[in-house]
Image (tube, rainbow, N blue to C red):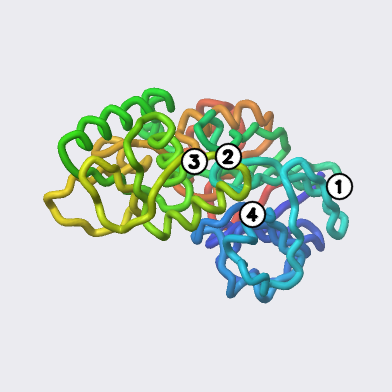
Amino acid sequence: MMDIRLLVSRGVFLETGSTRIALDPLVLPRAKPQATFISHAHQDHYSTKVLRKLSNIVMSRVTRKIIDPKRRLKNVIEVNPGETIEIDGLVVEAFHSGHIIGSLQFRITLRDAAIVYTGDFNLEKRVVLQPATPLRGDLILIDGTYGHPAYVFPKRREIYERIISRVKEVAGSGEIVLKSRKLGVAQELTALISMSTSLPVIVEPEIARYNEIYEEYGEILGRYAVSEEPRRGAPLITRLSRRLPRNIPAIPVTGWALKTGIPLSSHADFSQLVEYVKRSKAQVVVPVCGFREEFSRYIRENLGVDSYSGKDISIRL
């Protein structure tokens, strides 16, 4: 038997005996952890201010390139998908998570228990990145961003066809802007439109920076130009927060726009989250963000698996 205490608040903090682990911490833990794991480079999953004060920080090489381009962080352990490392008695395996470039999920084996941290993930085959594979573990700490039954998206192919149809329709008569998350969906849109149409694709400079990193690590995005200005007949891909004149058609491309835009997301939707739990064969599942309470209740009532959604959780494996 192993007793585990979890604190889920601005990161995930795990304690068992004298072992302490921090997962995507945004604040300093109460006691210094033996290891800290960063799943990916979205800003809601790390704090460089916090990381400067920690050691044994595990992340992918690509994630470090994005969040620490000048390599000022000390005590970083770079790990690639498929690699296994050992830190102070922890056996750590890294796997693709399929979310954004460099994103990882981790399986951490401590004594006889396997603890999986999914980070944000995606199980679907896309025009970019390798999809995640659900990992088996005793305790699964899972993304719950879309952990509500209302967030079941159409199949990727249907969404792609909708995007291409809409872009061709509007671009043929004027300007069109696709607003998306600048790291993740923007690169998927770049690849999709450039390789599925003959239309010239334009991306904002901020997005171009991330496009270049995708290409550096082997992702093919096709042709695109860099500009902040929309142009007739050329779809412009911008960040979600971009303000535009009202006369320019702008389509939000995000899972949150399920009814008002196009629900293309680099996150798993509800059906993928359920699939992951089923395939994990877990004893206990803890959603760590998003619709935590709703997803946890669904897991208990419909999948027959123990699940918790509190802030301070005690678990016995």
**Label 2: how many residues lie within 10 Å, few (<14), some (14-19) or many (20+)?**
many
Quadrant containing the N terminus is top right
Between discs 4 and 2, the one toward the N terminus: 4
Q: Which mark is residue 111?
A: 1
Residue located at (72% from left, 52% from top): 4
Question: Which secondary structure, mark 1?
Answer: loop
Q: Position of residue 188 (x, y in %)?
A: 45, 40
Residue marked by disc 2: 98
Q: Residues within 10 Å of mark 1 (few under 14, many from 20)?
A: few
Q: In terms of depth relative to the viewer, which is nearer, 205 or 121?
A: 205
Q: Is residue 77 above or below residue 138?
A: below
Pick the front one: 151 or 93: 93
Front tag of 4 and 1 = 4
Of circles 4 and 3, the one toward us is 3
Distance CA(mark 3)–CA(mark 2): 16 Å
Q: Type of residue at label 3?
A: Leu
Marks 3 and 1, how far apart at CA: 43 Å
Q: Position of residue 173 (x, y in %)?
A: 15, 36
Residue occupying image coordinates x 51% and y 26%: 302
Q: Amino acid at mark 1?
A: Arg
Residue wearing tag 4: 62
- Residue occupied by mark 3: 221
Residue 68 in picture, x, y percent from top left? 62, 67
